[in-house]
Image (spheres, helix red, strand yellow):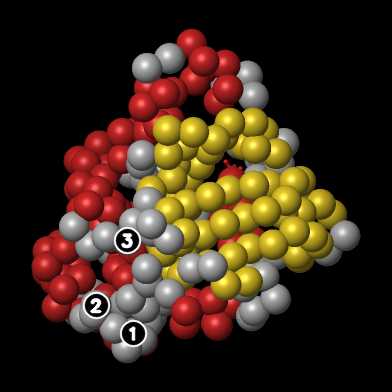
Amino acid sequence: MGKALQLTRVRAGYGPTVVLEDVDLSLSEHGSLAVLGRNGVGKTTLLATIMGHTTFHAGSIEYQERPIMRLPVYERSRLGIGYVPQTRDVFPSLSVEENLRVAALPGRWTVERVYELFPRLAERRRHMGNQISGGEQQMLAIGRALMGSPSLLLLDEPLEGLAPMIVDVLLKVVQRLIREEALAVILVEQSAKLALGVATEALVLSRGRVIHHGPSAELLADPARLTNLVVAG
Ligand SMILES: Nc1ncnc2c1ncn2[C@@H]1O[C@H](COP(=O)(O)OP(=O)(O)OP(=O)(O)O)[C@@H](O)[C@H]1O
Ligand SMILES: [Mg+2]
């Protein structure tokens, strides 16, 4: 199977400040990867670097076996990388439906398909981006990314601060995107248990470095090791 993404010895950060050091990461086509680690270890910086929002210092990033680390953000999204930032970017003064329509790129996703995935958004289609709940905003942020018809989806803590019922809905959707839509997904998540239940591979960061990269099942089967890596890491 081909590779969706390959990072080799990536060093990146903000201006001269280096946050990620020597980061290697590999994700197969249709693969799913949970990125774990405590606050401030560089999880957001990792996704932002894949998307092109940080200062790239060294190493390589290959998407579908082609180097992308010198490409501007819009070209990476045009090639099929979708990004849902931790800040859940939706336009507050556009309606739910307009938010979806302005994000559209040619491809297999349509507003109707997003509504089918999130019936809640269909009910809210005429509400403004700032008139919907946090959970609905997260659904909309994911819907917006899907409207670009990505083959790789980067999700930065999509479950953060949401009620258990909404967390359930979102987890099922992410699972469906991986299993039925064959998207490659990188999921950054504070709750290791939830993330490892969804993604088949796991990567743990500590102070900008990868301290573990392997099958999720391995970590799920060894809670002591998981705690040690994620909490003490
Ligand atoms: N725009 C920025 N400019 C300079 N430094 C930054 C910037 N954003 C983040 N950092 C620093 O980079 C490091 C990694 O931050 P990052 O946001 O990637 O961590 P994180 O793992 O996503 O944390 P959290 O779990 O809180 O979301 C931190 O030391 C942070 O202070
Ligand atoms: Mg973060």
Amino acid marked by disc 1: Ala
Is 39 placed above or below 152 here?
above
Would you name the residue on which mark 2 appears? Answer: 109
Label 3 with label 1: CB-CB less than 8 Å: no
Tell me the SS state at disc 1: loop
Residue shown at 67% from the left, 70% from the top: 69
Report x, y in % for residue 12. 75, 57
User: Is the N terminus in the top left, top right, bottom left or bottom right quadrant?
Assistant: bottom left
Instruction: Quote the CA–CA distance across marks 2 and 3.
Output: 12 Å
Would you name the residue on which mark 3 appears? Answer: 183
Tell me the SS state at disc 3: loop
N-term mark: 3 or 1: 1
Which one is in front in this view, the residue at disc 3 or the one at disc 1? 3
Report x, y in % for residue 67. 63, 71
* In-image side of 106 versus 125 (left or right): right
Residue shown at 67% from the left, 53% from the top: 8
Is 11 placed above or below 77 here?
above
Q: How crowded is mark 3: few (under 14 residues within 10 Å), some or many (20 or more)?
A: many
Amino acid marked by disc 3: Leu
Label 2 with label 1: CB-CB less than 8 Å: yes
